[in-house]
Image (cartoon, helix red, strand yellow):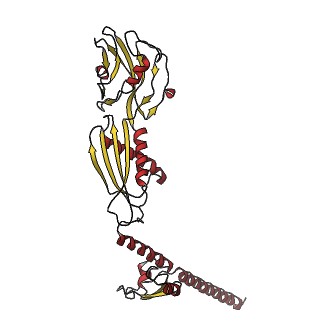
């Protein structure tokens, strides 16, 4: 398994970021790209308008005197307004904002709402909301709240006098991914993932990618009960020598396990030992050699410079210890029986 070595930022601004992630194992470019794209679009938090009231309009098909657009067209424009919280100091944000428009303007844009919405910054102030006559006065009531992803009208609580809006809370406008093949790998092909993230400006693409990654990590840690998984030795290597070294060590460990060698003391007591299935690689053997030596034992000489006799080390052997313990118990039982017999004989010999 190839782990990604680097994440390179190709392009970054407040609203757009391009990231290169490589190298990845074959197929993991699409796997990681689709997972991150889904979380970025549907699981990041943001602020948006979820209902509107304008000059007492009761439903979305009604008209307002002096306004060219009907409420349906106004709603379509209002849904595109993007908000950013000015500071984290605001712990309690009002649920709704009332806006009075007495300006003698024929066009009302999103920037005209900024004066009444003090705790939010409007990121697209040039967005057109409606066209009206110069003498027409308007009263807006907007409900703004924090949410995740997309919430349709059916899930909004419809109260009398309020016109609900299907709300897009996600600060992500679009995410594109591209998977390419890395160059310069000798044995295995690897993927490189390019993520192109566009936001509305309320969050930077870099922070959005970090939040999406943390959400995925929180979900994957459930499979390990909140503990970090143990890392195993990778199977695939781009370096051929390291790959051969890994397979040789794996084979050697299996053979030592087969010979019941668990400690250095077990290994150090042998100068010559016979181990099955520890020979040359099958690739380097000829067919005749492999047929004759496949089931044979191989004898090897080892010299580690360990003279265990001067340390008077006792090699732990479970079977021998059990056998010695049983023999000692038999001797103790025999001695007890002999002592009992002698005591009984003495009692019988004494005159009454």
Q: Position of residue 1 (x, y in %)?
A: 41, 61
Q: Position of residue 62 (x, y in %)?
A: 46, 14
Q: Position of residue 20 (x, y in %)?
A: 32, 50
In this picture, is 19 found above or below 160?
below
In this picture, is 37 found above or below 171?
below
In this picture, is 241 found above or below 328?
above
Residue at (42, 58) in percent of width and height: 26
| Left or right for 330, reference 277 | right
In this picture, is 292 found above or below 62?
below
Residue at (51, 81) in percent of width and height: 317
Q: Residue furthest right?
A: 352
Image quarter (top left, top right, bottom left or bottom right) of the C terminus: bottom right
Q: Position of residue 313 (x, y in %)?
A: 42, 84
Residue at (44, 73) in percent of width and height: 250
- Total marks placed: 0
User: In the picture, residue 91 is in which quadrant?
Assistant: top left
| Left or right for 2, reference 274 | left
């Amino acid at each position: 398994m190839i782990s990604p070595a680097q994440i390179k930022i190709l392009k970054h601004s407040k609203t757009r970021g391009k990231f290169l992630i490589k190298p990845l194992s074959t197929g993991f470019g699409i796997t990681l790209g689709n997972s991150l794209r889904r979380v970025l679009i549907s699981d990041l938090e943001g602020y948006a308008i979820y209902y509107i009231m304008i000059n007492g309009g009761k439903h979305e098909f009604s008209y307002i005197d002096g306004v060219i657009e009907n409420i349906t067209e106004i709603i379509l424009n209002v849904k595109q307004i993007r908000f950013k919280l000015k500071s984290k100091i605001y712990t309690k944000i009002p649920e709704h904002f009332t806006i009075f428009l007495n300006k003698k303007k024929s066009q009302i844009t999103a920037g005209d709402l900024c004066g009444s919405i003090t705790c939010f910054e409007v990121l697209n102030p040039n967005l057109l909301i409606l066209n009206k006559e110069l003498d027409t006065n308007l009263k807006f009531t907007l409900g703004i709240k924090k949410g995740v992803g997309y919430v349709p009208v059916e899930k909004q609580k419809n109260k009398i006098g309020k016109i609900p809006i299907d709300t897009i809370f996600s600060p992500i406008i679009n995410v594109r991914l591209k998977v390419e093949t890395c160059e310069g790998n000798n044995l295995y092909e690897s993927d490189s993932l390019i993520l192109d993230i566009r936001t509305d400006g309320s969050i930077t693409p870099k922070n959005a990618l970090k939040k999406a990654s943390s959400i995925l990590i929180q979900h994957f840690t459930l499979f390990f009960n909140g503990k970090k998984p143990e890392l195993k030795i990778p199977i695939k290597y781009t370096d051929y020598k390291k790959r051969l070294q890994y397979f040789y060590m794996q084979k050697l460990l299996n053979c030592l396990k087969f010979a019941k060698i668990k400690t250095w003391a077990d290994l150090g007591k042998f100068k010559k030992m016979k181990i099955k299935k520890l020979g040359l690689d099958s690739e380097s053997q000829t067919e005749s050699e492999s047929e004759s030596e496949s089931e044979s034992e191989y004898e090897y000489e080892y010299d580690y410079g360990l003279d265990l006799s001067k340390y008077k080390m006792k090699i732990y052997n479970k079977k021998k210890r059990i056998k010695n313990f049983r023999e000692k118990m038999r001797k103790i039982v025999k001695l007890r029986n002999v002592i009992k017999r002698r005591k009984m004989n003495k009692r019988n010999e004494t005159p009454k």
